Image (cartoon, helix red, strand yellow):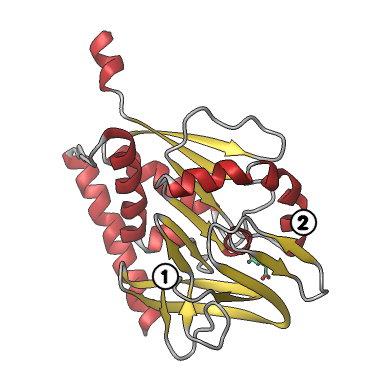
Amino acid sequence: MTNETTERRVIDVVSLYPNDMNIYGDSGNVLTIRRRLALYGYEPVIHHYNQGDDWPEHVDMILGGGGQDSGQSKIIDDFFTRADLLRELAADGVPMLMICGMYQLFGEYFETSEGKRLDGIGVIGAYTVGQDVRMIGNLVEHSNDFGDVIGYENHSGQTFLREGVAPLGHVNAEGRGNNGEDHTEGARVNNVIGTYMHGSLLPKNPKISDFLIAKAAERRYGAFEPQVTDTAKAELDRLEHFAVEARRVAAS
Ligand code: GLN
C-alpha cells in the first residue's frame, strides 16, 4: 500500500476556461495529453478551471484553447485575478500551450475589429489587432524546435511579435500565421507556446505533446522517465502513424 502511494507519478494539468475557450476541437489537446501521459506511465489529473473556480494546489502544465471575441470578454476579469500566478508559473518553467484566443490574451493586448481593447497578461511579448478579414485555412509551418507543424487557423486578430520574441515557426506561402504579413506563426517564450493552430494541434503533432509532457515531468520529478508497456508502445506507434499521415495529407 505504502509502495503504491510513493510510486504514483501524478501530473496535474490545468485546462484553462474549457467552457468559454474551446473552439475548433481544442479540447482534443487535453485528451491527447491525458492519454499520452498514461501511455508513458504517468497518472494524469485534469483540472477544468472556469471562472470562479478554485485554483488547483499543484500545477504541472496548463492548456488553453481558442474562443470567440465574446468568450475572451467573458473570461477576462477572472483571467486577471490569475494573472500574477500565471506569470510566476510561466517564469518558473511550467509548460503551457495557448491556442488562438488564449494566445492573444497571453500577449500584451488584443484590440478587436470594433475597437474594443482587452489587455493581456504579457507573458508573450506580442500584441494583436483585429481586422475585418478573417484568416482561415489549413496551415503548415516549419518550426526549428518541432520540425513541420500542421493545423488549422481561423482568426481575425493579427498578432505582431515584439523584437527578440521567437515565433513558433514560419508559415509556407499560402498560410497566414500570426498576421499574414511577416510569415511568422505563434511564439515560444521559455516553455510557453502560443499558436493559432487548431486542428486539434496535439494529436497531429506528437512532438509538441511530448515536449510539454517532458518539461512537466522534469520540473516535477527531475527527469522524464517514460515507463511504456508493449500495449502502450503499440498505441503510441499507431498515434505516430496517424500524425505522419495527417502531415502527408496537409503537405499535399
Ligand atoms: N477572437 C479571436 C480572433 O478572431 C480568436 C479566434 C479564435 O480563437 N479562433 O482573432
Location of residue 89 with respect to 246 vertically, above or below:
above
In front of the other: 32 or 130 = 130
Q: Looking at the picture, how far across and down is residue 151, in whole percent?
A: 46, 70
Q: Residues within 10 Å of mark 2 (few under 14, many from 20)?
A: some
On-image quarter of the C terminus: bottom left
Check if mark 2's residue and mark 1's residue have beta carbons within 8 Å: no
View extreme (left): residue: 230
Q: Residue at x 52, y 72 (%)?
A: 152
Q: Residues within 10 Å of mark 1 (few under 14, many from 20)?
A: many
In front of the other: 133 or 122 = 122
**Secondary element at tag 1:** loop
Which amino acid lies under the numbered mark 2 shown in the image of this protein?
Ser
Which amino acid lies under the numbered mark 1 shown in the image of this protein?
Leu
Q: Residue at x 45, y 49 (%)?
A: 91
Q: Which residue is mark 2?
A: 73
Q: Looking at the picture, how far across and down is residue 156, in whole percent?
A: 68, 76
Give residue 168's mark: 1
In the image, the residue with mark 1 has its CB under 8 Å from the nearest atom of ligand 1: no
**Secondary element at tag 2:** helix
